[in-house]
Image (cartoon, grey):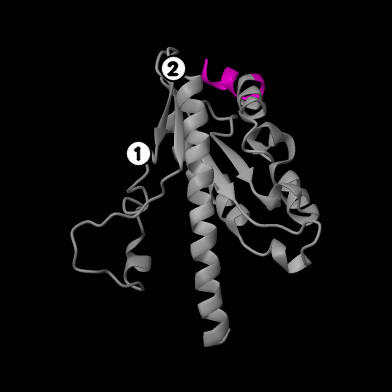
């Protein structure tokens, strides 16, 4: 990729990042209001996984082959966008809100570029599943996260198929929030398909 293409990409990422921030704020606002006066609460950027990678034990053989900085400790982990906690049962469901452009009417297929949906798949990895299930007290057979998609990706014929395939039998754990003014559909999805996991 040349300099011109890279400079365009930076601008695209800056715009996309701003839209993603708005999507996350909308989600937080909806659930802060919905959980008022209940046993549930929503937390921004939960910190319990901030340093999980630093603590990964490596064999002496691997350590001998990688760079080992002369620093006692550094931050190296993941931070989901939100955590939904049941204060009574001490169970937690972690949430990612992903806003992405997509291939829809009037746009070229290339409008579906972007990898926010792919980056969210890190939570499917065996190591993170084990850690998040343990922290969330949800049991070994529960997917410990919920991904909410916003933007044109929710109507993109390629991306919707990819996401549906990836989640397979766990379709309750993603939601296509096609109209962010419609908070009722988002709340209904949580109440009908996920809330029972926290009770």
Circle 2 crowding by C-alpha within 10 Å: few under 14, some 14–19, many from 20: few
State whether residue 133 appears in this view. Answer: no
Name the front one of labels 2 and 1.
Answer: 2
**Residue nearest the viewer, comparing 52 with 165:** 165
Secondary structure type for disc 2: loop
State whether residue 23 appears in this view. Answer: yes
- Give residue 86's quadrant in the image: top left
Does label 2 or label 1 sit earlier along the sequence? 2
Quarter of the image with the N terminus in it: bottom right
Residue 95 relative to residue 111: left or right:
left
Question: Residue 196, percent across and down?
Answer: 59, 17
Count every numbered label the image shows and give the total: 2
* Vertical comparison of 183 with 53: above or below: above
Secondary structure type for disc 1: loop
- Give residue 88's quadrant in the image: top left
* Vertical comparison of 105 with 44: above or below: below
The residue that disc 2 covers is 36
At 65% from the left edge and 31% from the top edge, which residue is drawn? 182
Circle 1 crowding by C-alpha within 10 Å: few under 14, some 14–19, many from 20: few
Q: Magenta stretch: residue 181 in it?
A: no
Do callouts 2 and 1 mark residues in contact (Cβ within 8 Å)? no
The residue that disc 1 covers is 48
Question: Residue 184, percent across and down?
Answer: 64, 25
* Magenta stretch in the rendered image: 192-199
Q: Which mark is residue 72?
A: none
Question: Residue 142, percent across and down?
Answer: 58, 30
Q: CA distance from mark 2 to mark 1?
A: 23 Å
- Give residue 90's quadrant in the image: top left
Residue 154 relative to residue 133: left or right:
right
Query: Overall secondary structure of the magenta stretch?
Result: helix
* Vertical comparison of 93 with 23: above or below: above
């Amino acid at each position: 990729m040349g300099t011109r293409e890279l400079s365009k990409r930076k601008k695209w990422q800056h715009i996309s990042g701003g839209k993603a921030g708005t999507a996350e704020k909308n989600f937080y606002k909806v659930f802060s209001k919905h959980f008022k006066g209940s046993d549930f609460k929503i937390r921004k950027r939960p910190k319990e996984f901030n340093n999980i990678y630093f603590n990964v034990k490596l064999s002496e053989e691997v350590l001998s082959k990688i760079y080992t900085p002369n620093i006692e400790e550094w931050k190296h982990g993941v931070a989901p966008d939100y955590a939904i906690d049941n204060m009574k049962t001490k169970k937690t469901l972690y949430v990612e809100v992903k806003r992405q452009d997509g291939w829809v009417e009037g746009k070229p297929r290339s409008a579906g570029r972007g990898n926010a949906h792919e980056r969210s798949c890190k939570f499917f990895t065996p190591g993170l599943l084990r850690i998040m299930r343990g922290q969330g007290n949800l049991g070994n057979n529960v997917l410990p996260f919920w991904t909410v998609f916003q933007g044109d990706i929710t109507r993109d014929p390629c991306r919707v198929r990819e996401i549906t395939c990836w989640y397979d039998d766990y379709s309750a754990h993603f939601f296509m929030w096609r109209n962010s003014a419609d908070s009722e559909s988002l709340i209904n999805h949580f109440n009908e398909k996920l809330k029972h996991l926290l009770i």
